[in-house]
Amino acid sequence: MPKIYILAKIIVEGYYNRYYTPMVDT
């Protein structure tokens, strides 16, 4: 798996968490 794929997954998950749980600041 290329690194860009992992990086994109982390970014997408981070965005998802930020939009779904704005109260939780990780």
Image (cartoon, helix red, strand yellow):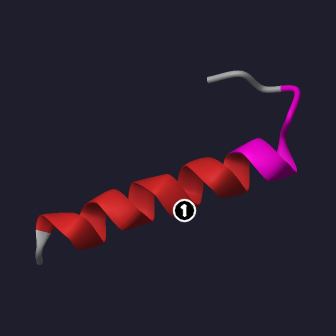
Q: How many marks?
A: 1
The residue positioned 70% from the left and 48% from the top of the image is 17
Q: The N terminus is located in which quarter?
A: bottom left
Please say if 26 is above or below 13: above
The residue positioned 42% from the left and 54% from the top of the image is 10
To which quarter of the image does residue 6 belong? bottom left
Crowd band around label 1 with a 10 angstrom C-alpha radius: few (<14), some (14–19), many (20+) = few
Residue 20 in the image, given as x and y percentages of width and height: 84, 51
Left or right side of 13 for 20: right
Residue 22 in the image, given as x and y percentages of width and height: 86, 35
Q: The C terminus is located in which quarter?
A: top right
- The amino acid type found where label 1 is placed reads Val
Please say if 22 is above or below 14: above
Q: Which residue is more in the foreground, 24 or 11? A: 11
Residue 15 in the image, given as x and y percentages of width and height: 65, 53
Secondary-structure class at tag 1: helix
The residue positioned 11% from the left and 74% from the top of the image is 2
Which range of residues does the magenta coloring cover?
18-23
Left or right side of 26 for 10: left
Left or right side of 5 for 3: left
The residue positioned 74% from the left and 43% from the top of the image is 18
Residue projecting furthest to the left: 2
**Is residue 3 located in the magenta-colored stretch of the structure?**
no
- For disc 1, the marked residue is 12
Please say if 26 is above or below 17: above
